[in-house]
Amino acid sequence: MQLDAGQADDICEGQVRMVTVAKSMNELQAQIDEKRKEIHSDQYSMSIGELANMYKDGELDVHPEFQRFFRWSPEQKSRFVESIFLGIPIPSIFVAQREDGKWDVIDGLQRLSTIFQLMGVLKDESGKFIEPLELTRTRYLPAMEGKSWNGTNRRHQLSQAQQLLLKRAKLDIKIVLRESDESAKFELFQRLNTGGSPLSDQEIRNAMLVAAKKPFFDWLRQMADFPQFKNCIPLSEQAISERFDMELVLRFITLRKQSDDKLRGLGDIGDYLTDTMMELAGSFPKFIESEKLAFQRTFEALDATLGDNSFRKYDPSKDRFAGAFLISAFESVALGIGFHADRAAKPRWIDLSDRVKKLWSDADFLTSVGAGIRASQRIPRTVGLGRVLFKP
């Protein structure tokens, strides 16, 4: 059978498509096979009593440093205890095994801390015992109200049978073994953190940093507590509790000296902060002196001049600052000053207030901070403007 030119072209195109599809499928399978090799896991059931003993012996770390430690209300905690009493299935607890064999809790902090607080063994960050949990009435067990593990009298105390029921209850434990790729546990942590009261992006980064380089985490937290810095950032209680103040410190040290080309190719700001933070963790503490110097000089200058107006919007017609903290102002003002702040001779900005006010009359700045502009588009312009405007 003779094929005309059009039919032959159709067959060739079809063969090319088949080859392309097959190549794509093989590429996907290769990626699946490769990534599956990076995850090594195990799972088994453990009694609450065994887990409590591991916690008391320091073999199970709930890391209060990087999570909002008590997000559950007494009512939520009591409903969880009710679920254990009634035999309602409890979601799995996810842990990651460290090099020393100890377990870091990846998902399940609230469940475990509730149990440990009820049993009177839970400690705060300073190692002091938390006041034991007193249960509240629940829908199915209203008689739980006022009960605790070791009540002041027998009427307010869980019976031995009830305590044993809790201690012998089994929880499903899923373990990311230490042979796994180092990033696997943090990817798991982020993916599991989707229900109830999710952690902020910075709290997830803190989780990564505590495990990868805790001294770096401690240093970031100390920087966030610098008095002049705190005076300049009027954040809400929620923003502070979610450690947005630490994210601002991280933005300062990761963006302050970044090249123009890198800023233009920034991509997603959250991914950038996470990836750059982990790169810096590998070189910690080599950079802390220069970054601390620039950070302190920047916020000493701002606190002495503008205080909590440093990053608010300025209205030239009324000659006053107003409104909430603005991240775009932080990018231009703090990073602009910080770009020049680590010079050997201490820079002076005697007209700092005037320069900040001038920023709010700059057409390029105002068009960069409007609604709908992504951080990857905004940051190269806001940071660049600040570097020019705040040159000593």
Image: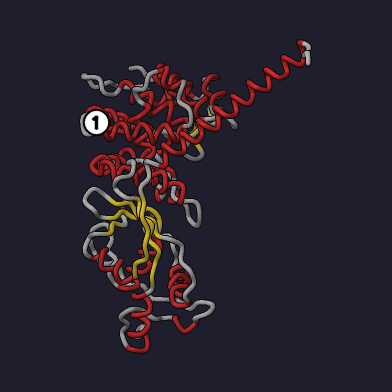
The colour scheme is: secondary structure
Where residue 150 appears, x then y in whole percent? 30, 80
Q: Is residue 70 visible?
A: no
The residue at the point 27 percent across, 20 percent down is 347
Where residue 242 appears, x then y in whole percent? 41, 48
Q: Is residue 259 visible?
A: yes
Crowding near the residue tagged with mark 1, few <14, some 14–19, many ≥20 C-alpha atoms within 10 Å: few
Where residue 294 appears, x then y in whole percent? 28, 28
The residue at the point 47 percent across, 73 percent down is 83
The one nearer the camera, 74 or 173, is 173
Q: Is residue 233 shown above or below 18?
A: below
The residue at the point 49 percent across, 72 percent down is 88
The residue at the point 37 percent across, 79 percent down is 165
For numbered disc 1, what is the local secondary structure? helix
Quadrant of the rendered image containing residue 69: bottom left
Quadrant of the rendered image containing residue 181: top left
The one nearer the camera, 306 or 240, is 240
Q: What is the three-letter code of the residue carrying label 1?
A: Ser
Identify the image quadrant of the N terminus: top right
Q: Is residue 181 shown above or below 339?
A: below
Q: Is residue 75 shown above or below 125?
A: below
Q: Which residue is mark 1?
A: 283
Q: Is residue 78 shown above or below 93?
A: below
